[in-house]
Image: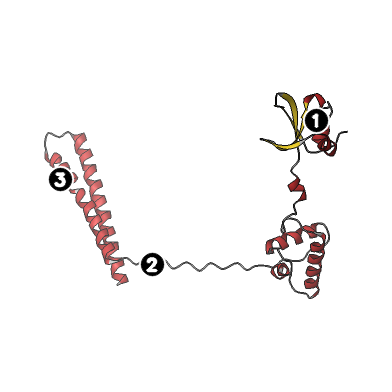
Amino acid sequence: MVTIKELTERFPVDNVAPYGKSIIIPAVEFGRSWEDDLKQQGCKTFSGSLEGRAVFYVKLPNESRKTRETPLGYTWSGKEDQRLIALVKEQLSTGREVDFEEIAKQLPGRSVSGVRGRIIRLQKKGLLPKFPRRKYRRREKPAPAPVTTKITKTETHDQLLNVIDRTFCLTPTIEHTLHYLQNRQSNPAFKTAAIDVVLAALDVIKKEFELMKDILAKTQKEE
């Protein structure tokens, strides 16, 4: 099995667009099994040409990703876990609730939410006992303001005007109907229908006046 180290010692390495840092291997020297071997080591192989010769470019893995330090807050080290476990047990031994904020202050670079999440993971692993979490009281919603049903004088005036308008709208209907009823040439069927129209209109007018009476009575009570 060929290794990346062997190839870098044997063939030139250069930055090749668009692949980046790659090993340049002439096609005639590229072994048949190398592609699979390199793939297992995290390298990708591309064919191309350089100065009129067929070559293979072996893109090297990004070393910066392997060598760079993991930023604080991403993973927890063993020392941090031990410190966290000790702080939690210390607070539990005093009989008080676990204060995530206080623990986070003693762990540089760790947030309250990060501490809380890590404690939960440690509990799942059995490294910390489960304990009741702090209960936060919900803020009670203020009682809704009472709905006032008092009608202003302006509203009363508008309601009365609407009732009067609806009543007077029926007046032409009644007048026309009575006019046709007085016509001797009107047939009996039409007269019966006309009488029904007049009675229905009078019934509507009666209801409108009752509504007007209720509005006035309600206004007097509120005053």
User: Which mark is in front, 3 or 1?
Assistant: 1
> Relative to the observer, which residue lies in front, 208 or 46?
46
Marks 3 and 1, the one that precedes in the sequence:
1
Provide the residue designation for mark 3.
175
| Mark 2 and mark 1 residues within 8 Å of each other at the beta carbon | no
Q: Residue at coordinates 24% horizontally, 51% vertically from top-left?
A: 166
Name the residue nearer the viewer: 36 or 121.
Answer: 36
60 lies above or below 74: above
Residue ID for mark 1: 35
Q: Which residue is mark 2?
A: 148
Report the amino acid beneath label 3. Answer: Glu
Q: CA distance from mark 2 to mark 1?
A: 83 Å
Say what amino acid the circle numbered 2 marks: Thr
- Extreme residue in the right direction: 1
Task: Give the quarter of the image for residue 137.
Answer: bottom right
Q: Secondary structure at mark 2?
A: loop
Q: Is residue 101 left or right of residue 79?
A: left
How far apart marks 3 and 2 lie (CA) works out to: 42 Å
Extreme residue in the bottom direction: 94
Q: CA distance from mark 3 to mark 1?
A: 104 Å
What residue is rendered at 74% in x and 54% in y?
A: 70
Q: Are marks 3 and 2 in contact (CB under 8 Å)?
A: no
